[in-house]
């Protein structure tokens, strides 16, 4: 009787060693799910302006201009925070600042009707 139990136990141990636990596949699935979740979070953190989805954050020009567009419906320009609205391909601040969205990473300050300043997205870490 003891020999039968010993053979059964040895068989079970040998079977578990041969088949493995399959954690490797689950780890790969988990990492791809994490990447998909991060991608969705990044997509959610975009502002829809006309035909473009732009990232919230800092936009800087070659000059000194810096604009920070925030998710709460405000933007900071010149050290002051203003509410903004979206009109077509423009972001319009409550102080009259008009930023035309050229693409996913470029804004043009055309407040006076002329293209006076181009700002580029500046990702921060």
Image (spheres, rainbow, N blue to C red):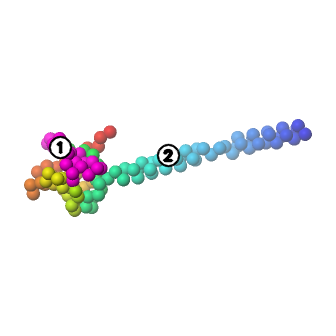
Which label sits on residue 54?
none
Q: Is residue 76 magenta?
A: yes
Which element carries disc 2, helix, strand or loop? Answer: helix
Label 1: how many residues lie within 10 Å, few (<14), some (14-19) or many (20+)? few
Give the number of the mark in front: 2 or 1.
Answer: 1
Answer left or right for 59 relative to 31.
left
Give the quarter of the image for residue 76: top left
Q: Residue at x 20, y 45 (%)?
A: 81
Residue projecting furthest to the right = 1
Q: Residue 44: x and y, percent?
A: 36, 53
Which element carries disc 1, helix, strand or loop? Answer: strand
Which label sits on residue 80?
1
Q: Residue at x 18, y 55 (%)?
A: 92
Find the distance from the CA under tag 2 to the CA under tag 1.
Answer: 41 Å
Q: Quadrant of the N terminus?
A: top right
Q: In the rendered image, which residue does mark 2 sit on?
A: 31
Q: Residue at x 26, y 52 (%)?
A: 73
- Magenta residues span 63-84
């Amino acid at each position: 009787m003891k020999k039968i139990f010993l053979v059964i136990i040895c068989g079970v141990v040998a079977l578990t060693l041969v088949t493995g636990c399959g954690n490797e596949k689950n780890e790969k699935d988990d990492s791809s799910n994490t990447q998909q979740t991060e991608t969705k979070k990044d997509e959610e953190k975009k502002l829809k302006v006309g035909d473009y989805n732009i990232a919230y954050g800092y936009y800087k020009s070659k000059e000194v201009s810096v604009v920070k567009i925030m998710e709460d419906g405000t933007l900071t320009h010149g050290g002051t925070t203003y509410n903004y609205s979206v009109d077509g391909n423009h972001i319009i601040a409550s102080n009259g600042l008009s930023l035309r969205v050229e693409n996913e990473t470029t804004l043009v300050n055309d407040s006076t009707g002329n293209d006076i300043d181009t700002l580029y997205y500046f990702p921060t870490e």
